[in-house]
Amino acid sequence: MELTPIEVLAVAGNESTYGTSKFATQFGNFFGLHGNGPAGTYYTPTNHVPVMMFPVQNSFLISGNVFVGRVGGFLKPGMGTNPQQFFSILNHHGYATGNSGYANYMTGKNGPYSLVNNCLDGGAQ
C-alpha cells in the first residue's frame, strides 16, 4: 500500500474541519474514527454513535495510525496515483456512506485533496 501525505491530510482536513472541530480539539480524533478509543469514547448526543478519543499528546499521529490501519486492507499498491479511486474505496468502507459524490467532492477543484495538494505544491496549478 502506498498512500501519499496528500490523501491522509485531505481525510484529516475534511473529518476535523482542518483541525478545528470538537472531535479534533477535545478528543484528538482527526480522522472521524468511530468505536472505542485509547483515551475513551464519546457518544454523540443525537444518535449515540461512539467516537474514538485519543490522548492529547501525539493525537494526530496516533489517530492517523489507527486510520491507516483500518483502511489499509482495502487499498492496493500505487493508489496514491489515483486519488479518485482512493476516496471511492473509503466511501465504500465507512466514510461519507450514503454520499455517492464523496470522491468527486474530495478531489474537486475546492475539495480537501485539491486544497492540500495546492498547499504542498506551493500553490502551483
Image: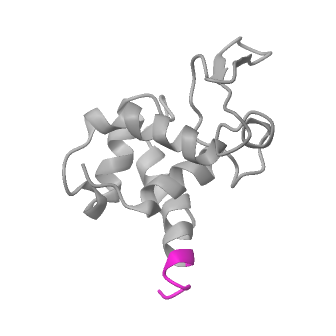
> Measuring 61% from the left and 54% from the top, which residue is drawn there?
13
> Measuring 61% from the left and 23% from the top, which residue is drawn there?
38
The magenta stretch is 119-125
Tell me the chief SS of the magenta region.
loop
Q: Is residue 65 left or right of residue 34?
A: left
Say which of 39 and 92 sits in front.
39
Asked which colour scheme the image uses, the reply is: one colour
Extreme residue toward the front, this view: 57
Q: Is residue 92 left or right of residue 32?
A: left
- The reply to whether residue 109 is in sight is no
> Measuring 47% from the left and 53% from the top, which residue is drawn there?
8
Q: Position of residue 24 (x, y in %)?
A: 72, 42
Q: Is residue 33 left or right of residue 68?
A: right
Q: Is residue 97 left or right of residue 42?
A: left
Q: Is residue 120 inside the magenta stretch?
A: yes
Q: Position of residue 116 (x, y in %)?
A: 54, 67
Q: Position of residue 42 (x, y in %)?
A: 73, 19
Q: Is residue 69 inside the magenta stretch?
A: no
- The reply to whether residue 54 is in sight is yes
Q: Position of residue 75 (x, y in %)?
A: 26, 42
For residue 32, which quarter of the picture?
A: top right
